[in-house]
Amino acid sequence: MGIVLSWDDLKEKLDSKHNGQKIVFTNGCFDLLHIGHVTYLKEAKSLGDILVVGLNSDSSVKKLKGKERPVQNEMDRASILSELRSVDYVTIFEQDTPEKLISKISPNILVKGGDWPVEKIVGADHVLSSGGEVKTLSFVDGKSTSSILNKIKQL
């Protein structure tokens, strides 16, 4: 089970406790957790020793997904994510993208879902220039928060 930390506390923890371990970073809204998320996070964790999840803040989700989102607030989403066995740390970011967060923690591996081409992954340039790797992982077709919400609306 993971821990929810501020950026500074996360950086300090990674520097002091996990020196030399392979850090994997991913980010997203994770609004309604579903099997696509769980599969993706498990695969991300398998690439390294520590999995850090950058979680879009409520205001960031609204900008990305519209005024009706997120369904769950950022602290609930962070707490749920932190309870997953594959997730070591969760940190919330307010910006539109996690670029500053990625630069701050400099993960060894940056991952996104298979629906993201590597050249469009925010922070890829920083990770690659630091000698890290950028990967796209499996995407579970038909499993998304939007599809769940659409199904609920049809009930």
Image (tube, rainbow, N blue to C red):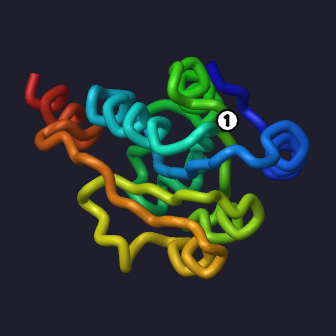
Q: Does residue 13 appear in the picture of this structure?
A: yes
Q: Quadrant of the N terminus?
A: top right
Residue 69 at x, y percent in the picture:
42, 44
Circle 1: element type: strand
Q: Is residue 98 left or right of residue 30?
A: right
Name the residue carrying label 1: 89
Q: Quadrant of residue 73?
A: top right
The front one of 127 and 98 is 127
The front one of 71 and 142 is 142
Residue found at x 9% / y 29%: 154
Residue 26 at x, y percent in the picture:
51, 51
Residue 4 at x, y percent in the picture:
72, 32
Please rate how many residues cluster around mark 1, counting C-alpha atoms within 10 Å: few if below 14, some from 14 to 19, many from 20. many
Residue found at x 50% / y 72%: 122
Farthest residue to the left: give it: 154
Is 15 rendered above or below residue 125? above
Residue found at x 42% / y 36%: 41
Residue found at x 65% / y 25%: 2
Is 154 rendered above or below residue 102? above
Number of numbered discs: 1
* Amino acid type assigned to the residue bearing label 1 in the image: Tyr
Q: Quadrant of residue 131?
A: bottom right
The front one of 55 and 137 is 137
Residue 65 at x, y percent in the picture:
38, 55
Q: Does residue 58 appear in the picture of this structure?
A: no
Q: Is residue 71 left or right of residue 99?
A: left
Is 55 rendered above or below residue 106? above
Q: Quadrant of the C terminus?
A: top left
Q: Is residue 67 left or right of residue 85?
A: left
Q: Is residue 69 left or right of residue 89?
A: left
